[in-house]
Amino acid sequence: MADTPYKPIMSVADLEAFIERDFPQVHMDGRVFHIASVEPGATTMRLEPKERHLRPGGTVSGPTLFTMADVCAYMVILAHIGPAKHTVTTNLNINFMHKAAPGPIFCTGRLLKLGRRLAVVEATITDEKDTIVAHATATYSIPPGRKDTVK
């Protein structure tokens, strides 16, 4: 990973505990999103798609890939600012590039900008063969003062 000024303050375990406590609905149909790693300026997630994530023709659906990009972007931001649950998506643009065959899907979110009020993240979604299946950019609004942050 290239040099980055961003240093994480939450670990994989911290992020998983945050999801369980504040967003258990992410796993209401079973745990399919897994945080694989947290690094300076980046977070990688893994998706184990189930039948409900597939579209006709047997590929992982666009809404599933969109959700993965959004969740991964949120996780990389929180990993670097702490558990500010009111950090919200203000924009997410995604380009679907290749069909995502059933099987593990990976998303790496990289911080492009982390300011006091806005964060911009690039999310790259790949399959097991490291083929880029989708690419997204997301902008998030960070609450002022992060009063919802619990340490």
Image (cartoon, helix red, strand yellow):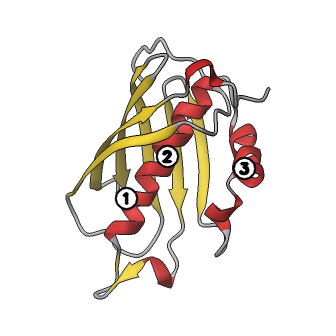
Foreground disc of the pair 3, 1: 3
In the depicted structure, whether residue 8 falls above or below residue 19: above
Residue linked to disc 1? 66
Asked which quadrant contains residue 68, the reply is bottom left
**Mark 3: amino acid:** Asp
Residue 29 position in % (x across, y down): 64, 75
Residues 49 and 86: in front is 86
Q: CA distance from mark 3 to mark 1?
A: 21 Å
Residue linked to disc 2? 72
- In terms of secondary structure, where does tag 3 sit? helix
- In terms of secondary structure, where does tag 2 sit? helix
Q: In the image, 29: left or right of 5?
A: right
Asked which quadrant contains residue 126, the reply is bottom left
Residue linked to disc 3? 22
Circles 2 and 1, Cβ within 8 Å, touching? The answer is: no
**Mark 2: amino acid:** Cys
For the C terminus, the quadrant is top right
Q: Residues within 10 Å of mark 3 (few under 14, many from 20)?
A: few
- Compare marks 3 and 2 and give the one earlier in the sequence: 3
